[in-house]
Image (cartoon, helix red, strand yellow):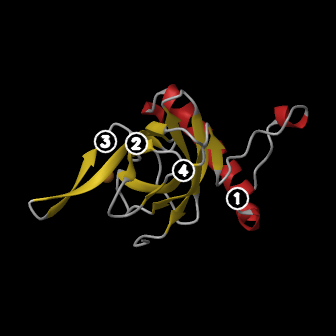
């Protein structure tokens, strides 16, 4: 993808990348003010007369579900997919069902579980995740995780990418996930 001549990249893909870069820059500015000087962001002209674009928080909640501590392990150079981890907490008195994930940083995101089959660790897609009232589920290395397929650009440690949690209720929760260095557990 990155080796393809720029002129051959369809306009839709290019604008998608531009949107992603802007979002990534906004996240970097919001989440790490100290780094802002390294990547100065010129505010769009429209922002001066309207409300500021919403920043993506590191924790967020909807329909009784709290999402926090989202992170991805920095993929090795050239890797096309990466696992993302996060903590889901159902603070409501009813069941909450997560039916999917999404990220503008990747072509696709899906829930995976790690299972041991014939003594080998394998990953298997899982359609949904049900959290009972009051239940907290930690997606972590070696267990449940979100697989991001088709990364749109390399991820650097310290960077943040948006991660969207989709609920059966139709609601979504978006948090920013921190890219941790290769080897993080
Ligand atoms: Cu996986």
Q: Residues within 10 Å of mark 2 (few under 14, many from 20)?
A: some
Q: Which one is earlier in the sequence, the residue at label 1 or at label 4?
A: 1
Marks 3, 4: nearer the viewer: 4
The residues tagged by marks 3 and 1 sit, at their Cα atoms, a distance apart of: 31 Å
Q: Nearer the viewer, residue 138 or 83?
A: 138
The residues tagged by marks 1 and 2 sit, at their Cα atoms, a distance apart of: 29 Å
The residues tagged by marks 2 and 3 sit, at their Cα atoms, a distance apart of: 8 Å
Q: Residue at x 67, y 56 (%)?
A: 28
Residue 18 in view, yes or no: no
The reply to whether discs 2 and 3 touch (Cβ–Cβ < 8 Å) is: yes
| Outermost residue, right side | 49
Instruction: Name above or below for residue 171 compared with residue 26.
Output: above
Q: How many marks?
A: 4
- Residue 126, which numbered label? 3
Q: Residues within 10 Å of mark 3 (few under 14, many from 20)?
A: some
Instruction: Name above or below for residue 146 compared with residue 39.
Output: above
Q: Which residue is mark 1?
A: 31
Q: Splitting the image into 4 quarters, where does residue 84 fall? A: bottom left
Q: Nearer the viewer, residue 30 or 155?
A: 30
Quadrant for the N terminus in the image: top left
Q: Is mark 3 within 8 Å of ligand 1?
A: no
The reply to whether discs 3 and 1 touch (Cβ–Cβ < 8 Å) is: no
| Residue 182 picture location, percent across and down | 42, 70
Q: Splitting the image into 4 quarters, where does residue 185 fall? A: bottom left
Q: Which residue is mark 4?
A: 134
Q: Which one is earlier in the sequence, the residue at label 2 or at label 4?
A: 2
Q: Which residue is mark 2?
A: 129
Marks 2, 3: nearer the viewer: 2
SS label for mark 4? loop
| Residue 85 picture location, percent across and down | 46, 57
């Amino acid at each position: 993808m990155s080796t393809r001549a720029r002129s051959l990249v369809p306009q839709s893909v290019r604008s998608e990348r531009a949107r992603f870069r802007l979002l990534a820059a906004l996240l970097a500015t919001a989440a790490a003010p100290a780094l802002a000087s390294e990547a100065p962001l010129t505010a769009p002209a429209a922002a001066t007369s309207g409300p500021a674009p919403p920043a993506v928080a590191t924790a967020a909640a909807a329909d009784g579900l709290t999402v926090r501590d989202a992170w991805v392990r920095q993929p090795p150079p050239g890797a096309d997919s990466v696992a993302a981890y996060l903590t889901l907490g159902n603070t409501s008195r009813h069941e909450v069902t997560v039916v999917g994930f999404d990220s503008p940083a990747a072509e696709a995101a899906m829930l995976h579980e790690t299972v041991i089959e014939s003594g080998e660790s394998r990953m298997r897609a899982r359609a949904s995740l049900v959290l009972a009232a009051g239940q907290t589920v930690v997606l972590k290395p070696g267990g449940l995780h979100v697989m991001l397929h088709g990364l749109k650009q390399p991820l650097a440690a310290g960077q943040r990418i948006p991660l969207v949690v989709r609920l059966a209720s139709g609601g979504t929760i978006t948090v920013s996930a921190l890219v941790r260095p290769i080897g993080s557990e």
